[in-house]
Amino acid sequence: MEIRFLGTGTSQGVPVIACHCDVCTSSDSRDRRLRSAILVEEAGKCFTIDAGPDFRQQMLREKIEHLDFVLLTHEHKDHIAGMDDIRSFNFAQHMSMPIYANARTCAAVKREYAYVFEEHKYPGVPAFSLHTVDNRAFTVQGIKIQPIQVMHLNLPILGYRIGKMAYITDASHIAEEEQEKLQDLELLILDALRMEKHYSHFNLAEALDMVGRLHPRKALFTHIGHGMGLHAAVNKTLPSNVQLAYDGLRIHIDDPDTPQEEAGKGGMEFNGGLIQ
């Protein structure tokens, strides 16, 4: 399995428009964050979790020319606003794109992209094939996917577990029964918005507490705002098995024991917590 971090930023991205804080003006590329999403390549298939407003830019940056399906966590704009650009894959692959989401998110996609679902479509609009899922495991093109229901304030949304990797964004609470689905992980990807407490996201302390509860071998934090602080400075304070993710980071899980950053893609060393 390979995981690529397409974006690791919060809904505004980093830098934030009109902000001149140390993070937004940082020259460290790891402090520049597009809206959060990942791309997963597994068993010969390629899929994204979420397709936010930076989707086109992310696909071009990563040189993605084929996409098999899309998983959506929830309907907020920073997670679905780029779905019109799925049409490029429709045209290249001559197929409707399978989209998997819970019932409320599917309804929002139909509402936000009503022109996709009209009986008499305007030529060239995207083609989506919506599939409603709940919190029960399902299989897509040979890949088993276990949804994880988490709370985003009072909004129930989905994270996803694929094999020994789990991706959870926009969470402020994970019920104990859902935490049971997150045991024995090699890699946990979890939201950590900022240092201060937030009403609908884990802050850094809460994310670290959840890592302590779940005991994944490694953890990477995402959906990061400028209120977190500078990437390099924060990483120096974290446990050796926990790091902040950054845009463009690639992680390989080659076997159950060795999630590793792709050689030459940055300075993070999981075992030593080293930042170069």
Image (tube, rainbow, N blue to C red):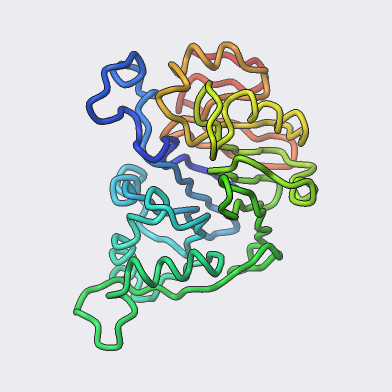
Residue visible at 51% across and 34% down in the picture: 222
Report the side of 103 relative to 120 (left or right). Answer: right
**Up-down relation of residue 200 to residue 59 (above or below):** above
Q: List x then y, in percent, for residue 57.
A: 29, 46
**Up-down relation of residue 5 to residue 28 (above or below):** below
Q: List x then y, in percent, for residue 26.
A: 32, 16
Question: Of residues 61 and 44, which is closer to you in this image?
Answer: 61
Q: Image quarter for residue 208?
A: top right
Residue visible at 29% across and 63% down in the picture: 84
**Up-down relation of residue 201 to residue 102 (above or below):** above
Q: List x then y, in percent, for residue 238.
A: 62, 17
**Up-down relation of residue 234 to residue 160 (above or below):** above
Residue visible at 42% across and 37% down in the picture: 10
Count of numbered labels shown in the rendering: 0
Q: Image quarter for residue 182?
A: top right
Q: List x then y, in percent, for residue 135.
A: 68, 62
Report the side of 10 relative to 147 (left or right). Answer: left
Q: Residue furthest left?
A: 123
Residue visible at 65% across and 38% down in the picture: 188
Report the side of 176 relative to 108 (left or right). Answer: right
